[in-house]
Image (tube, rainbow, N blue to C red):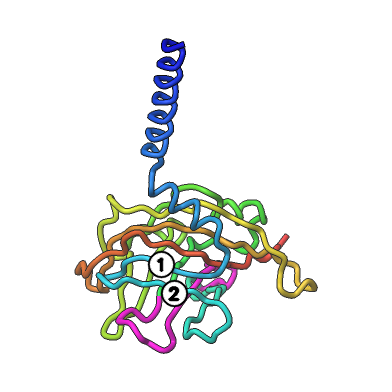
Amino acid sequence: MKRISTGILILLTIINYSCNKEKELVDPFIEELEQFKAQTIIQFSGQVLDNEINWKFGNWNNGIGGYGESFWCLTDSKKIQQRNFTIYDYEQRDDIISLKIKSPAFSIDSSLLFKKTIFEIGRKALRSSSNSIYEGFEIQGNSKNACFSSLYGDQNASSFEIIKVQELTPDDPEKDYKKLRLWIVVSCNLFQCEGQKIGMIKGGKFIAEIELERNE
């Protein structure tokens, strides 16, 4: 009987140890991303130029605004467009006022399938000033004293990743377009227009919405 009790005690000790080791193996960053992917409200959180930002756009009552836009001032042809997203603090309570994601440019005559591949899940290139408007994403922003961009310098150690995509029902069902909600994680260098590095985005997390016309 004593041998059986000792065996049970050893078994329970092993199970308890295994459970504790399993808990230790959970990556806190992965757990944080899973919590982020479960959220749906338009938002940005992260460190921007040493400022901790936590913006959530809900009903305009908290001083945070957000919008998507079709941007075509790129070439002589208005068919060459970007899909951009901006979130901003219109009460300007922090040093950082606004942040914008600019997509690679594409022709609106392209298929819907091609347009959606631009925003599919995966790591994306950050455009540099030496690349064309069709290559990579760009982060722009404004502080109270300056504007900044990811465009004007080295991004070799940076990352921009879309970790989740959801297709939404358009606000106006009469219009023939698709609407996407994107979960984006970004860390990158930020530069003034002259190319001088002024800081970084660290651990930035966007939930953004963009519209894709079905020009087919």
Quarter occupied by residue 25: top left
Residue at the limit of the structure toward the right, as seen here: 174
**Residue closest to the eye, 164 or 149:** 164
Residue 144: x %, y % from top left: 30, 85
Q: Callout 2 environment at 10 Å: few (<14), some (14 to 19), or many (20+)?
A: many
Residue at the limit of the structure toward the front, as seen here: 1
Q: What residue type is labelled 2?
A: Trp
Residue 113 versus residue 146 in the image, above or below: above
Residue 129: x %, y % from top left: 32, 63
Residue 16: x %, y % from top left: 42, 30
For the point 43% across and 56% down, which residue is it? 135
Q: Is residue 81 left or right of 132 when viewed as pictured? A: right
The secondary element bearing badge 1 is classed as strand
Give the residue pinned by disc 1. 45
Q: Can residue 105 be seen in this view?
A: yes
Q: Does the magenta stretch include residue 149?
A: no
The secondary element bearing badge 2 is classed as strand
Mark 1–mark 2 Cα distance, whole angstroms, equals 6 Å
**Residue closest to the eye, 194 or 47:** 47
| Quadrant in which the C terminus is drawn | bottom right
**Residue closest to the eye, 177 or 32:** 32
Q: Is residue 130 visible?
A: no
Q: Which amino acid does label 1 sit on?
A: Ser
Give the residue pinned by disc 2. 55
Q: Is residue 77 magenta?
A: yes
Residue 179: x %, y % from top left: 65, 65
Residue 165 versus residue 13 in the image, above or below: below
Quarter occupied by residue 21: top left
Label placed on residue 120 = none
Q: How many marks?
A: 2
Which stretch appears magenta? 76-98
